Image (spheres, rainbow, N blue to C red):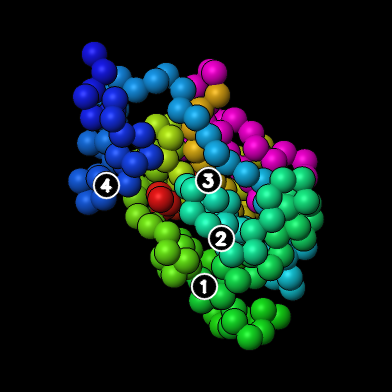
Amino acid sequence: MTSPLHTTLSRRTALRGLGAIGLTAAAGLFASSQAHATSDLVVVDQMGTGPFDGENCGPTSAVIAMIAAGRPVEHYVSGTAGAAVGGNARAVQEMRARCGLSPWEDPSTKTVDYTGAYLGDLERGIRDADGTATHFEFTEGLEAAAHGSVAILHVHHGRLLGEEADYGHFVVAQGEDAEGNLLVSDPGRAQTIGIRAYSRDRLLEARQGDATVVS
């Protein structure tokens, strides 16, 4: 039987309002949802986004997540032009600044003494851009994404891709394909992969940290 709430609210809107209740409750609430949640994922390449493009998966994922969640991102370029190398350099550089990773006036320098970013940095940037960022455990992030919410996932890139690479990486998940695999936009493989479906088991094997649900 379909939930009365589900007949009047979208998955994204309802999950946005759950907050502290937790996504475990959300999973039960939408147990009767459509079998396959839709996705508004876009492709944005972290390469060509400035001197720190090799470690810009975090702010790039924040841009992807904001767009997928229906939030405006200043200077975002859509379509083929935006998916090209450097196509969204300005949007990513400004998200870097919002995340506290580089100063607004000089994207060629860093304001942190570590490589890459933490989920907390991305949450700061998303909130600064008037989005909502809620920190959850990785498995809860997968559950949210399966039901149509937007989740930034912290993964081990090598394990995700089945390669020898050994480093942490951020990707964005939202929705499922016809087989129930989660759709993932990978800013580090924008030109060769773009958006790919992964099984939950594969994503769990690649888990490196937690997840942030964006709305």
User: Residue 159, image x and y in percent?
Assistant: 60, 41
Closer to the N terminus: mark 3 or mark 4?
4
Q: Could you tell me if residue 142 is visible in this image?
A: no
Residue marked by disc 1: 98
* Range of magenta residues: 178-204
Residue sitting at 78 percent across and 51 percent down? 81
User: Residue 69, image x and y in percent?
Assistant: 47, 47
Tell me where residue 167 sits by quadrant.
Answer: bottom right
Marks 1 and 3: CB-CB under 8 Å?
no
Closer to the N terminus: mark 1 or mark 2?
2
Marks 2 and 3: CB-CB under 8 Å?
no
Q: Secondary structure at mark 3?
A: helix
Q: Which mark is residue 17?
A: 4
On screen, residue 207 versus residue 133, left or right, reads: right
Q: Which mark is residue 133?
A: none
Which three-letter amino acid code belongs to the residue tagged 2?
A: Val
